[in-house]
Image: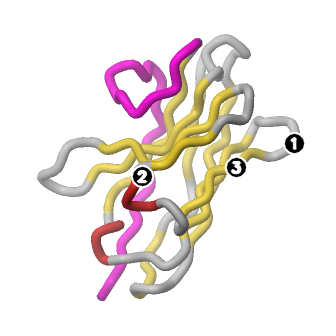
Amino acid sequence: QVHLVESGGGSVHAGGSLTFPCVASASYYISYCLAWFRQAPGKEREGVAAIDRGGRISYVDSVKGRFTIFQDKDKTTMYLQMNSLKFEDTATYYCASKGPFSCLFNAAEFGYWGQGTQVTVSS
């Protein structure tokens, strides 16, 4: 049984910040790679940030230096900290998990998804 729950999205002005969690209850195997994706209206789902069990982290170029992915100590909750938000960051944000061993931004490889949380950035 896998359960991923995001919360804490919202509306913010450009330049502002948001941090929100994804609580993950998933087996050790299928939580090898945890990631944040986002999908804006009319666009494909895009990988934003990912972290694997070894702590290796990757970001899509458009968020590097602005977003941070991290986990709490027991790795049951993953967070996305978003700073210097831009209008183009507006999207529904999803957390997702997959098993070993890759941790790339290929949405098709992720079998488990949260319900999504909306982030709206006003310019």
Q: Amino acid at mark 3?
A: Phe
101 lies left or right of 56:
left
Checking the image for residue 105, the label placed there is none
85 lies left or right of 123:
right
Q: First in sequence: mark 2 or mark 3? A: 3
Q: Is residue 18 above or below residue 104?
A: below
Q: CA distance from mark 2 to mark 3?
A: 15 Å
Q: Position of residue 13 (x, y in %)?
A: 41, 87
* Quadrant placement of the C terminus: bottom left
Task: Specify the segment rendered in magenta.
Answer: 101-123
Q: Amino acid at mark 2?
A: Tyr
On the image, numbered disc 1 is attached to which residue? Answer: 73
Q: CA distance from mark 3 to mark 1?
A: 10 Å
Q: Position of residue 9 (x, y in %)?
A: 50, 64
Q: Position of residue 94 (x, y in %)?
A: 44, 44
Q: Are marks 2 and 3 in contact (CB under 8 Å)?
A: no
On the image, numbered disc 2 is attached to which residue? Answer: 93
